[in-house]
Amino acid sequence: MSRLVVVSNRVGDLRNPAQTGGLAVAVSEAIKDRGGIWFGWDGNTEDEADRSATIETIGNVQTILHPIASVDYQPFYLGFANSVLWPLFHYRADLVRYQQDYYDAYMRVNEQFADGLIPHLRGDDLVWVHDYHFMPLGAMLRERGCGAKIGFFLHIPFPPPDIFAALPNHQTIMEALLQYDVIGFQTFTDVTNFRRCVEEFTQAEVNGERFRFNGRVSVADRFPIGIDVEAFQKMASSKAEALFSEKFRRNLVADKQMIGVDRLDYSKGIPARFQAFSQMLTRYPELSKTVSFLQIAPPSREDIGAYAEIRDELERLSGTINGTFADFDWTPIRYIHRSVSRDRLAALLRTSQVALVTPMRDGMNLVAKEYVAAQDPEDPGVLVLSRFAGAAEEMPEALLINPFDVDEMADAFNQALNMPIEERRERHEILLQRTRAFDVHTWQERFVACLSDPGAWQTSIKTY
Ligand code: ADQ
C-alpha cells in the first residue's frame, strides 16, 4: 500500500487529534493506516536565523514542520491567501486587496515548500495537498521531478469564470491546478465552476470532468467533507456539559434558544442574521421573552481590516438590538467572542432548539452537520441553512433560506421555532442519515481511493 503524504497549512496534533477537530482526526487516521508524512508550516512568525524544519516521528508517521520566513508570512498568509484568494473565492471581489508582492510571496513560499518536501518523497507516494494556500505546489513538485500521484482538495468554494478572472495571474493558477492528478471540491457547483474556468482560461482538452493538458490527465470531482458523527454525538450527550448548558439557558429566562457558531468571518453572514433576528422580534412580538439567541464567534485573522470591521459591526448591532428589545428579565442576544471547548459546543448545540447557519457563501460548513449530529432524535431541533453553504446540496430537508433576504430569514426563524414535533423528527431523521453517509471517514476514503487510481475513478452522479 502506498504511503500518504499530506500537505496543509497547519499540521494537526497526531497524539491528540480529537482536540483539533474532525479534519485532524480523519487525516491522521488515513496517514496512520498507510504510514506517511504530514507536512506543514511550523506556526512560527519570528525569524531565527536559518530556522530549519522540525521533524518528529510518531509510529509509522512523520510530521515535518517547515518554517516560513517572517518577511514572507505577512504577504503570503494575510496578503495573498486571506486578502485575495479568500474574499475572491467567496464571491467578494469588492474585498480583494491585491498587491504584486503578495503574489510573489505566495509563489515563493510554495517554492520553498516544494524544495522542503521533495527530498522526502518516493515515487509511489500518494501526495494530498490541502486548500487555497498551496494551489501551485503540485506543479512545483512536478518541476522538481516528482512522478508520484498528487491530489488537491479545496475546502472553500471555487468561483465562476467571471469572478475568477478578477484574479491577476489566474491563467497561471489554472494551469498549475491541471498538474494535479485529482482536483477535489466540496460541491457540484464548485466542480462545474472549475470546469468552466478550464474551458475559458486554458487550452486543455475537456471531456466531462477529465482534462488533458500538457500531456497530463486530471480528474475533478466532488468530495463533500463531513464530521465524525459518533464522536460528536458522544460529546453532545456528556452529562456534565448538559448540566452547564441547562443552567446557562435557565439564566436567560427564555424557553427556547437559537444558536449560531462561526469563526468571526464576513463570509458567515452574521450581521444579516442579527438583523433577521431583530426583524423576527418586530414581526412576531409574541416571541418576545420566549426565545434568546446565542452567537458564539471566536476571533479570526484580526490583522486584516475587513475582519476588524465585522467585529465592530456585530458589537454595534447586538448593542442596538438588545437596547431596543431587552427587558429586566430578558436579554435577546448573547454574543460571545471567544473559542469554546468542543464538548461544550456540542452540548450547547444539543440544548438549542434552532441553529442558524446562514453564510453568504461557504465551502461546506461543518457546524450544520455538527448541529444535526448533536440532536436528541426524539426531540430534535431545527436547522436553518443558507442555500449558499455547500452543505445545502446534501441537506435540502433543512429550512433553506436566502441570507440576502432578511425578511425571508425572519419568517424562517419563526417557522423553525413553531415547527411541530412530527415534522422536526421527519426532517431530522433524513438529515442524520445523510450526515452519517457523508461523514469524514467517507470523505477521506473516497479521496484516497480516487487518488490511488484516478484513471479508473467514476465521477459521482448528481443524486443523493
Ligand atoms: P471554516 O470556515 O473554519 O472551515 P466550518 O466548516 O464551519 O468553517 O468549521 C468550523 C469548525 O470550527 C467547526 O467544527 C466548529 O464547530 C468549530 N468552531 C466554530 N466556532 C467555534 C468556537 N467558538 N469554539 C470552538 N470551535 C468552534 C473551512 C471552510 C468550510 C469547510 C471547512 C472544512 O470555510 O466551508 O466546511 O473548511 O472543509
Image: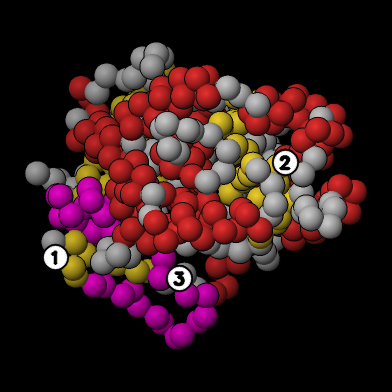
Percent of width and height locating residue 104: 57, 58
Quadrant of image for the N terminus: top left
Residue 160 position, x and y percent, is: 60, 27
Q: CA distance from mark 3 to mark 1?
A: 23 Å
Q: Residue at x 28, y 35 (%)?
A: 442
From the viewer's perspective, tell me whether residue 257 is left or right of residue 394. Answer: right
Nearer the observer, 345 or 131? 345
Q: Is residue 98 above or below residue 414?
A: below
Give the mark, 3 or 1, whose residue is nearer the N terminus.
3
Question: On the image, numbered disc 1 is attached to which residue?
Answer: 59
Q: What type is the residue that disc 3 sits on? A: Gly
What is the spatial separation of the Cα atoms under label 3 and label 2, in whole angstroms? 45 Å
Q: Is mark 3 within 8 Å of ligand 1?
A: no
Instruction: Tell me where the magenta segment starts and ends, as one range.
Output: 27-56
Is residue 39 something one can see in this rendering? no
Which circle, 1 or 2, is nearer the viewer? 2
Determine whether the residue tagged by mark 1 lies in a helix, strand or loop: loop
User: Residue beneath label 2, please?
Assistant: 290
Q: Position of residue 106 (x, y in %)?
A: 53, 56
Camera-nearest residue between 386 and 319: 319
Tag 3 and tag 1, C-beta contact below 8 Å: no
Residue at image mark 3: 43
